């Protein structure tokens, strides 16, 4: 959620104030009211500044959720991960996002989405396969999935402000779109689902429950 808040603030700032680099003036609270004034970061420059270009559509759709990006014509049949990284230099932030944060982010998100998919699966008594589902989530969150590719990247140069509205730091923020073909991802997930099942105690009741959750898994993924 924190990542999406950061993306939202950047995207809205790009659209609304990309051409404005003046610093905001601190505002006094109205008399008799106790309220905090938020000073969002200001865009000093971004990838499209020199060309007068706005943020790509995938970035705007990502504000609503990953699945909205996956519904776009260019990304149908693909699984999407958004990676965000801040840094003192654009090159450093891009490198860290691509080589470090992407691997961790993809694995973490896979674990979250697997867990959410299990939660929504209609398979009866889930208590019988609780340890199985926990094992699958753990493996998914630790697996380095192969086949992910960076489709696009957007960067912004930000001026941040203190709670008092005074200029604080300047930083580059890089946002990258990573995708993988869902058929390739499904093959890897199948191995995880079956591998975790092999470690479960064998009882007819539990095997039926595991088979049911496996069959229902991709309906909500």
Image (spheres, grey):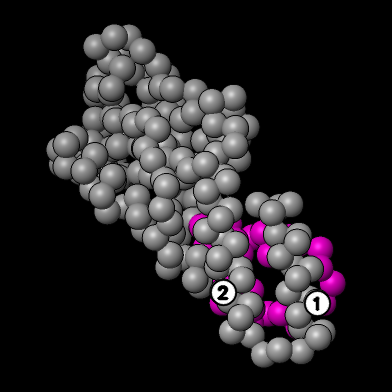
**Where does the magenta region start and end?**
110-136
Q: Nearer the viewer, residue 203 or 167?
A: 203
x then y, percent, for residue 34: 47, 47
SS at mark 2?
Answer: helix
Which mark is drawn over residue 66?
Answer: none
Query: In the image, is 56 to the left or to the right of 46?
Result: right
Q: How many marks?
A: 2
Q: Tell me which residue sits at (33%, 29%) in the image.
A: 154
Task: State the CA–CA distance, disc 2 to disc 1.
Answer: 16 Å
The residue lying at 42 percent from left, 68 percent from top is 142
**Label whose residue precedes the other's in the sequence (2 or 1):** 2
Res. 170 in view: no
Asked if the residue at tag 1 contacts the one at tag 2, i.e. Cβ–Cβ closer than 8 Å, the answer is: no
Q: Residue at x 64, y 60 (%)?
A: 116
Q: Is 178 or 156 nearer to us in this picture? A: 178
Residue extending farthest top: 51
Is residue 7 something one can see in this rendering? Answer: yes
Residue 217: % across, % down: 70, 59
Does 129 appear above or below 1?
below
Q: Main secondary structure of the magenta part?
A: helix
Q: Secondary structure at mark 1?
A: helix
Residue 151 within the magenta-colored segment of the rendering:
no
| Residue at image mark 1 | 208
- Seen in the picture, residue 34 relative to 161 is either above or below; the reply is below
Hey, which quadrant is residue 145 in on the image? bottom left
Q: Position of residue 4 (x, y in %)?
A: 47, 43
- Is 51 on the left-hand or right-hand side of 138? left
Seen at 59% across and 24% down, the residue is 73
**Residue at the disc numbered 2:** 195
Tell me where residue 67 appears, x and y as whole percent.
60, 40
């Amino acid at each position: 959620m924190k990542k999406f808040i950061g993306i939202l603030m950047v995207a809205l700032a790009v659209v609304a104030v990309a051409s404005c680099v003046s610093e905001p003036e601190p505002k006094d609270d109205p008399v008799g009211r106790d309220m905090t004034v938020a000073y969002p970061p200001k865009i000093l420059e971004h990838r499209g500044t020199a060309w007068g270009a706005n943020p790509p559509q995938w970035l705007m759709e990502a504000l609503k959720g990953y699945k909205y990006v996956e519904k776009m014509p260019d990304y149908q049949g693909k699984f999407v991960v958004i990676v965000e990284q801040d840094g003192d230099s654009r090159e450093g932030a891009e490198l860290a996002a691509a080589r470090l944060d992407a691997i961790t982010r993809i694995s973490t998100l896979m674990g979250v989405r697997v867990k959410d998919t299990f939660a929504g699966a209609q398979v009866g008594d889930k208590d019988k396969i609780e340890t199985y589902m926990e094992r699958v989530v753990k493996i998914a969150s630790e697996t380095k999935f192969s086949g992910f590719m960076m489709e696009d990247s957007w960067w912004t140069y930000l001026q941040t402000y203190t709670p008092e509205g005074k200029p604080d730091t300047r930083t580059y923020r890089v946002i990258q779109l990573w995708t993988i073909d869902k058929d390739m991802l499904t093959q890897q997930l199948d191995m995880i689902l079956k591998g975790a099942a092999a470690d479960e105690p064998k009882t007819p009741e539990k095997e039926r429950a595991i088979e049911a959750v496996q069959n229902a898994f991709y309906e909500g993924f």
